[in-house]
Image (cartoon, helix red, strand yellow):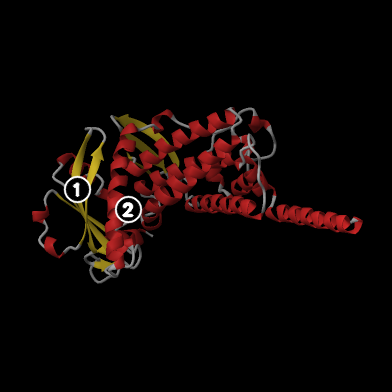
Amino acid sequence: KGKSLGEGQKKKGKKRKRAKAEVRDLGADVVRLWVASSDYTQDICVGPEILGRSSAQYRKFRNVLRFIAGCLNDWDCAPSVHHEQGDDVIMRFVEITGESSEGVLSLSDKYMLHLLQRFCREVDQSFENLAFTQAIAHVMFFINSKLSAGYLDSAKDRLYADYKTSHHRRTTQYVLTMILENLLKSLAPITPHLSQEVYTFLPEHVISGFNECPVMMSYEFDSVFTHGWLRSESWWESNEAERDMQIIEQLSEEANRALEMAREAKVIKGSLDASVYIVSENKGLIDLLHGLQPNRELPSLLKTSQVILEESTSNISNFDELQFRREASITLNDLDMNADVTVIASKASGHKCARCWNWGELSEGLDVCPRCNHVLSLQ
């Protein structure tokens, strides 16, 4: 019996050593993330599978932060809120060369700032109440549901294809700087090494836009911890942007279903190969969508090359040939009513641009669209 007991103790000792080795290999930040994600009011479980989930989430944080930081490599202008006209926020950007531009924020940019203000408020309240599990849950939801699955995907077209100092691209970069600053600060108490590592690789012109904390700035060392806590501006709040984006999200769900039908039928390979028709007799809805057509905002939100708006199916000459349709009722929150909508997916017309991969008319004698041709001529 004594021999059996000794063997059991040896096995337990080996398990403890193996567990310690696994924790050591994962690193301090992953362990801290696991602790913050655990509900300490109940029994806390730990094991390779649980720590693996924390490690996967850590890598997700790292990849998103790296993507945002990469998009800000050429951010070297001074932004300012020039003035406001009703619900439109006018932003002015002064480039390092002295050139300046101003214009309104796009709907997706306004909505992202609106969500960012809410995020800062929720995270701040969670840390104030020492509810670390709740705080990290807010960070995970914001990154997974609002950034990766939404804003960052729709912003790629203007970040990659627009001219580097175009106003539409600069406004998106401004939003990304605010997101990056607040994400680094909200993650710093949980994953300090990750936040500091990202901070040290940021260009100086990005860091110069961060909030300054007079008390902490007296220290000789430069760190993400010397820039104070979360940053939020009152003008970020926009209930109108949230209402309009809720309508777009409903349309996007129907468009995705129609696109999936076209993809299964092998009419298209990806969403950029498609054109989407949106047909509705509701004038308010059509007017809202028409306002999003400039600068390719509506196609970017729906992740397609083209969006065609009509008030009646009779205006579509080949309507009977279009098979991939979705009939839906869209909720219009401001009017407390619904709008009947027909969403149709089809193969995009024209030719594929070799630079931005969107379909449409190409510049004469070239394999790029007029937008890309203009951008290339400026470089």
Circle 2 — which element? helix
Q: Disc 2 to disc 1, how far (Cα)? A: 20 Å
Q: Residue 111, position in %: x, y?
A: 37, 39
Residue 258 seen in render: yes
Which quadrant, please, contains the N terminus? bottom right
Can you name the residue that lies furthest to the bottom here? 365
Q: Amino acid at mark 1?
A: Val
Indicate which disc, 2 or 1, sits on the residue closer to the N terminus: 2
Which residue bears the numbered disc 1? 341
Res. 98 image quadrant = top left
Q: Residues within 10 Å of mark 2 (few under 14, many from 20)?
A: many
Name, please, the residue furthest toward the front: 1
- Please tell me how crowded label 1 is: few (under 14), some (14-19), or many (20+) other residues with Cα within 10 Å: many
Q: Nearer the viewer, residue 22 or 297?
A: 22
**Element carrying mark 1:** strand
Residue denoted by label 2? 300
Is 191 on the left or on the right of 205, as rendered?
right
Residue 81 location, x and y as percent?
39, 33
- 216 in relation to 373, above or below: above
Residue occupying the point 33% across, 55% down: 303
Q: Where residue 7 appears, x then y in whole percent?
A: 85, 59
Identity, as a three-letter code, of the amino acid under mark 2 = Ser
Q: Is residue 278 above or below residue 100?
A: below
